[in-house]
Image (cartoon, rainbow, N blue to C red):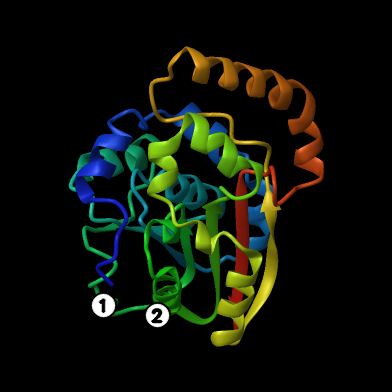
Amino acid sequence: MSDKLTTQQYWEAYYGNNHIDKNRIMNVCSYYDSFWEIFIQKTKEKQTLIEIGGFPGRYLAYLAVKYNIEPTCLDYNSDIAEIEGVFKVMGIEDHSILQQDFTTYKTPIQYDYVMSNGFIEHFEDFNAILDVHVDYMKDQSKLFVMIPNMRGYIRFYKYLVDYKNLKIHNLKCMHLKVFKDFAKRHNLKIKYLSHYGGFPIGVHQKLNIFQKLIFKVHRLLFKFVLNPYLMKHPSRFFSSSIIAIFEKN
C-alpha cells in the first residue's frame, strides 16, 4: 500500500506548530459533539481509542477528556513534541504515541474505538486502507471515519481557487456507496452515514485577483446565506464532509 498521494514532508509542513491551544481544541472538536455521542458510549470502565493519522492529536485529546478514554495516536509525523504538547495542555497523562507508517505497521492489539479523519482520501487504493482499519477493532467496537467531500459543485470551486489541494485528494472515495460496500465486506453495522457541513470556502494557496473575486463571492453567498441551510439539510453537491460510524458485531 505505497500509493500515497502525499508525503511525510508535506504533512509536517502543512500542520506546523500551532495547535497547542486549549480553547482552539475545544472549539474545533466540540463542533462534532452530536457525532461523538453516537460514536462513544460512556462507561465506568477505562476504554481505549486510537486515531489513524492522528497528528496533531486534538481530536484524541478532546475525546480523552470528554469520555475518560485512554488515547493512542498513530502517525508517521516526526514532530512528537507537538502531539505531547496537545495532550499536556488538555491535562492528559495516560496516552500512547505510535510513530509508524500505517501502510506497513501491523497492530499487535485492538481498541474499543478507532478513528481516522481526513486520511483515506490521500491514497489511490482507499479501499485497502479502509480495510486495514478493521484490524484495529475489538469485537463490539466502533469505527469513526470522516473525509472531506470534494465532489459536486465543490470540485468546480476548488478547481478554480484550490487546485493543488484538490489534486492530492482521491475523489473516488467520496461516495456514500464506498462506505456501504466497506460495511458489507466486514459485516459492520452502519450507525451513521451522511454528508455533513456547510460549503468549504477556505483555500490552501495564494490567490490572484480573479481567484480572490471568486473566493469573496462564495464567502458572502455561503457563509451568510446558504451555509445555515446546509447545516440542517446536508447536500452531496455542497456539504464539506462525509461522516461514517460503524459498529463491529
Q: Which residue is mark 1?
A: 106
Looking at the figure, which quarter contains the C terminus?
A: bottom right
Which image quarter: residue 97? bottom left
Residue 77, visible in the rendered structure: yes
Left or right: 1, with 122 as reference point: left
SS type, badge 2:
helix
Looking at the figure, which quarter contains the N terminus?
A: bottom left
Q: Residue at the location (60% across, 16% down)?
A: 216
Tell me if label 2 and label 1 are in contact, CB under 8 Å: yes
Tell me if residue 139 comes above or below residue 160 in the rendering.
Answer: below
Which image quarter: residue 107? bottom left
Could you give the CA–CA distance between mark 2 and mark 1, rounded to whole angstroms? 9 Å
Q: Position of residue 18 (x, y in %)?
A: 34, 28
Q: Residue at the location (50% across, 27% down)?
A: 23
Q: Position of residue 6 (x, y in %)?
A: 29, 51
Residues packed near mark 2 inside 10 Å, few (<14), some (14 to 19) or many (20 plus): some
Front residue (pair 59, 152): 152
Tell me if residue 74 comes above or below residue 239 in the rendering.
Answer: below
Q: Residue 135 bears which disc, if any?
A: 2
Front residue (pair 227, 137): 227
Residue type marked 2 = Asp
